[in-house]
Image (spheres, rainbow, N blue to C red):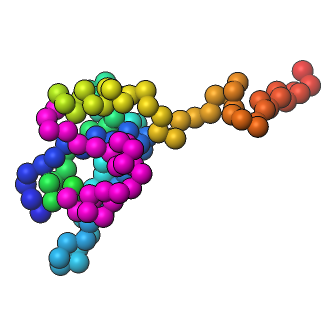
Amino acid sequence: MATDTVTVYCKLPNGLRYVVIDKDGAEHSHIFHGLNHSSARLGIVPGAGVTHVPVDIWAAFMKERGTSRAVKNGLIFTASDASSGKAKATEREKEKTGFEGLDPNKPGPGLEKAPKPDTGH
């Protein structure tokens, strides 16, 4: 495995676990930290989790998953440097990922707010 790293930014709430099988058949598991990771929650990079990943792992990921919706829609991305990555993540902070919770007062088209149960008190 390479020692050079790339910084990966991930807007998925729980990040993404990626497994690479090397030439000897050994599995190497890598986690791309997501929005619920401390790097995002502490505001280090608003709107994305941050992970430093070996360059060869990122290359393998992009070869296998580079056309995935998560990459195409900018939910997982890299930047040339930390300030560019932070700027890119901040710019995309308000973008929807599809994993947001429902607003209980406005549950969505064709749905109604559930009535409060009668507790008999």
Q: Toward which corner of the image does residue 14 lie, by quadrant?
A: top left
Q: Residue furthest right?
A: 120
Tell me: 101 left or right of 88.
right
Q: Is residue 108 above or below residue 22?
A: above
Visible residue check, residue 20: yes
Residue 67: horizontal and vertical position, in percent?
Answer: 35, 57
Quadrant assignment for the C terminus: top right
Q: Residue at x 71, y 35 (%)?
A: 109
Q: Toward which corner of the image does residue 75 lie, by quadrant?
A: top left
Q: Is residue 119 above or below residue 79?
A: above
Visible residue check, residue 51: no
Q: Residue at x 30, y 51 (%)?
A: 31
Q: Is 22 in front, or is 91?
A: 91
Residue 63: horizontal and vertical position, in percent?
Answer: 26, 63
Q: Toward which corner of the image does residue 13 lie, by quadrant?
A: top left
Q: Residue at x 47, y 39 (%)?
A: 97
Tell me: 60 left or right of 101.
left
The reply to whether the magenta stretch includes residue 80 is yes
Residue 68: horizontal and vertical position, in percent?
Answer: 39, 56
Q: Residue furthest left?
A: 3
Tell me: 57 left or right of 90.
left
Q: Which residues are magenta?
A: 59-82
